[in-house]
Image: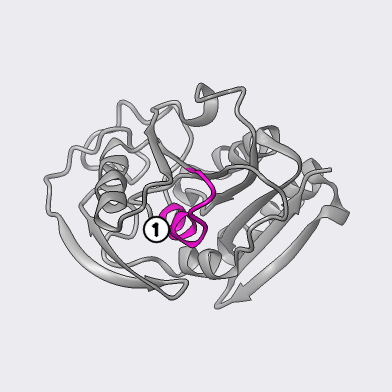
Amino acid sequence: MSAGLLFPFMKGVIALSEHYYTNKPSSSHDEKTWTFTLRGEPFSFTTDRGVFSKGEVDFGSRLLIETFVFPGLDGDILDVGCGYGPIGLALAKADPSRRVVMIDVNERACQLAEKNAKANGVKNADIHFDERGLAGFERSARYAAVVTNPPIRAGKDVVHDIYEQAYERLIPEGECWVVIQKKQGAPSTKQKLAELFGTENVEVKGKKKGYYVFLAKKN
């Protein structure tokens, strides 16, 4: 979902061509609030125009949320491209003992994620807007797991950059969890993760309706 993303490039996009990865969406507001159950917990989400999957939690994010297993090591979780917050908030609520850091380049999405964290009583989530994404965000920070529903519309180079930065931000034995459709780049994602983490350290943890959930472990 994740939905949003990491990158410094969409500043000059005009309204007719802007997408959910635009830094500051110019589309008029039309907020909607609805409920959804994730990992057995009811959530109330407020969404708006200019964010990814504003009408419901998209299937890919739901599959990642339900498939994810917390790593057996201490450390924070990083949600890259958090959007209005379903992945990060669901994981934060599932394990209140961990801090979940959520980041997106879409300012409107981050504002909604903040609102949704408060609405759902989630206090262990830190939400950050940065138009450069991880490129300049807490560069010394390291995480036990990185989760992402990457921004396919941004193109393969941008998506693969997420994987590279995720690898750099993981502690030893940390885990990278990715959900992606087969027709939107699952084979190239698997190849890229294998290059970064080693073929023997990449596996499919979930597969449904053409979506794959990959788990890559760092040595």
Q: Residue at x 51, y 54 (%)?
A: 149
Residue 110 higher or lower than 71, as above or below: above
Residue span colored magenta? 86-100
| Dot 1 crowding, Cα within 10 Å, few <14, some 14–19, many 20+ | many
Give the percent coordinates (x, y) of residue 155: 52, 44
Report the residue marked by disc 1.
86
Nearer to me, 124 or 203: 124
Residue visible at 37% across and 47% down in the picture: 123
The answer to whether residue 120 is above or below residue 161 is below
Q: Is residue 188 left or right of residue 5?
A: right
Residue 159 point in image, percent of width and height:
57, 43
Q: Secondary structure at mark 1?
A: helix
Q: Is residue 71 magenta?
A: no
**Residue 148 place in picture, x, y as percent:** 54, 51
Q: Is residue 92 magenta?
A: yes
Tell me which secondary structure the magenta stretch mostly adopts: helix
Residue 177 falls in image quadrant: bottom right
